[in-house]
Amino acid sequence: MKKEQFVSSLVSLASLTVGTVSSRLAVEHIPIENTSLKRWGLVFGGIAGASALDRKSTGRKIGQDIAISIAVTQAGYLLKDWLGDKVKDNKILAQALGNPMDEYMGLDSTNFLSSYTSPNYDFISEDVVYEEVQEFAG
């Protein structure tokens, strides 16, 4: 492996990460009520951005990677919204769409971090049974 290839891979990783994070932030902060409409806009915007750029320079490669990542991330969320209830009992597809395991620590996976932005997310642990813990003198 050459140093240039390694650096190029790191640049792509960083660019793709920036695109993913940016697309999630954009959905939260675009002042449109319809989330599905925002996601479709980002998908088409990402496709248009990726199509308009080539990989002849580092800057264009970064831009194209960000655009691709925006489109892929939002397309995944659209797919999850569309198929989520239909595949919730299929353990492989549910996990592929981003649902945690059903019985992870006794939590209901439909609520798993679903409202982490809410100031009151204590409902997540309401169903967890805590065992009595004995303190040991140390």
Image (spheres, rainbow, N blue to C red):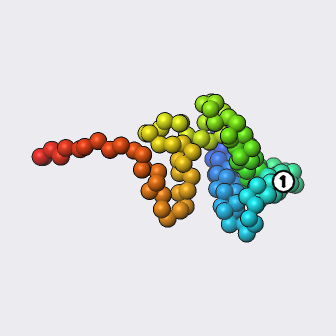
Residue lying farthest to the left in this orientation:
137
Q: Nearer the viewer, residue 12 or 95?
A: 95
Q: Which amino acid type is marked by label 1? A: Phe
Q: Nearer the viewer, residue 54 or 34?
A: 34
Few, some or many residues within 10 Å of mark 1 (<14, 14–19, 20+)? some
Q: Residue at x 70, y 60 (%)?
A: 27
Residue lying farthest to the bottom in this orientation:
31
Residue indicated by mark 1: 44
- Location of residue 133 by image quarter: top left
Q: Is residue 93 visible?
A: yes
- Total numbered labels placed on residues in the image: 1
70 left or right of 127 in image: right
Q: Position of residue 76 (x, y in %)?
A: 72, 45
Q: Nearer the viewer, residue 109 or 98?
A: 109
In the figure, 20 relative to 90: above or below?
A: below
Secondary structure under tag 1 reads helix
137 left or right of 108 in image: left
Q: Position of residue 115 (x, y in %)?
A: 55, 56
Q: Position of residue 127 (x, y in %)?
A: 42, 46
Q: Residue at x 57, y 45 (%)?
A: 110
103 left or right of 137 in image: right
Q: Position of residue 79 (x, y in %)?
A: 74, 43
Q: Is residue 58 visible?
A: no
Q: Residue at x 53, y 57 (%)?
A: 116
Quarter in which the N terminus is drawn: top right
60 left or right of 25 in image: right
